[in-house]
Amino acid sequence: MKFFDNGDALTEPRGFFCSGVHCDVKGKHDGKLDLGIIYSKKPCSVAGVFTTNDVKAAPVLYCESLINDETTACHAIIANSGNANACTGRQGEIDTKKMASEVARHFNIHSKEVLVCSTGRIGEVLPMSRITAGIRDASEDIIQEYDGAKAFQEAILTSDTCTKSCSVKIPASVGEITIGGVVKGAGMIEPNMATMLAFLTTDLDATNTELQSILVDAVNKSFNRITIDGDMSTNDTVLLMANGNSGIQFHKESKKFQQSFIKAVESVCAALAKKCVSDGEKVTKFVRMKVIGAKTTEDADKVARSIANSLLVKSSWYGSDPNWGRIVDAAGYAKIGMDFDKVDLDYDDIPALDKGEPIIGNKSQWKEVVSAKEFTITLNLNMGKAAGEIWSNDLSEEYVNFNKSE
């Protein structure tokens, strides 16, 4: 497996085209790219994972209805930033279908072969006259085979400071296949995803059922391990399209190849998830919160999330303060029956607690660890053999200033 960081990503698998245009979704006349299309002339198998929020945006409900049909084939994804089309009632549903039908009209395909994604502010209807004009321009760029991979990445950004992409190549029995992925997301990021859109393309030939199983597992090992601010959004979507342009069929390849493909999808998702955390709104640190020695995986995940979402813990990380007291307090209110007298805690490989007893002599080393831009905290409950891990970051005053109004 060959891994490539950044790059065009989505158009590296054969037969995919992208575009990104400015259609002034927010009405600011700032020239920002805010609408993009991914397109394959050949119909694609497709898989999707979506937000678990009870309040789901119109595009999420629309995509879910299509993905739930195992016979669904997809040619295109249309995505806009600047407006989430969430909590917009019947008009939101109408506008979502209009976006799909406009893309379909330009490419002479069926509207049910177009998936729709939106991200941005909640509770405002889309400016459809500008959206339809943008779809026209974005479609024309693809028809002219304009190289719009980078433009698409820019078009889906909101509060992100940079584009995020990667790709993987895997050898097969004959030739190779490619997987490309991009993601946007910097705030309202919490396991089971959040204001995050992720798109993966591959030129492998695989069924919807095969892709769905692989994608769900990959998301659980990556995007569902991240938290930035503990807020879950209405629009989270991860989509995987496979057009088969490589001529390589998943079910006809060896078990070794199939496992390599599964690992590659997991690697792409993990890399993109980490990029989200590292680009969190006004964050300065990337923290791996590992919990081991739990009775069950569910207990381990619950403790790790409880710690990673604690505002007191995240504030201490920002201040480079190795405040293990806040960590074990947050672990305790996860209420999984933790016995503090059994607990070990390490900052990277520096012990802080040994069976509940602080290793005071290491205090200066704890401080050195949490002063770094990236570090790992490992909490051993010594109650069992299960483990869990969450990827998180710190909380700064700049985050509050950035989010106190829109």
Image (cartoon, grey):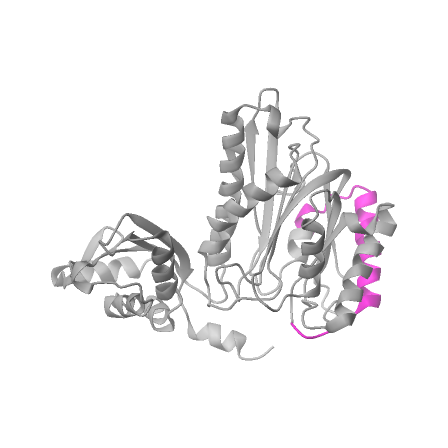
Q: Is residue 168 left or right of residue 28?
A: left
Q: Is residue 5 left or right of residue 143?
A: left
The residue stretch that appears in magenta: 122-151
Instruction: Single out the residue that lies furthest toward the bottom.
Output: 405
Residue 132 falls inside the magenta stretch:
yes
Q: Where in the figure is residue 224, as x and y percent of width and height? A: 48, 55
Residue at image point 51% right, 26% down: 255
Residue at image point 23% right, 60% down: 366
Q: Where in the figure is residue 158, as x and y percent of width and height? A: 62, 64
Q: Is residue 19 left or right of residue 208?
A: right
Q: Where in the figure is residue 92, as x and y percent of width and height? A: 75, 68
Q: Where in the figure is residue 357, as x and y percent of width and height? A: 13, 62
Vertical order, 340 against 137 (above or below): below
Magenta residues: mostly which secondary structure? helix
Q: Quadrant of the C terminus?
A: bottom right
| Residue 176 in view of the camera | no
Q: How many marks?
A: 0
The residue nearer to you, when weighing 251 against 178, is: 251
Vertical order, 292 against 285 (above or below): above
Residue 181 falls inside the magenta stretch:
no
Residue at image point 68% right, 46% down: 149
The residue nearer to you, when weighing 299 against 326, is: 299
Residue at image point 37% right, 70% down: 310
Instruction: Single out the residue that lies furthest toward the top.
Output: 174
| Residue 194 in view of the camera | yes
The residue nearer to you, when weighing 217 against 132, is: 217
Vertical order, 4 against 367 (above or below): above
Say which quarter of the image contains residue 319: bottom left
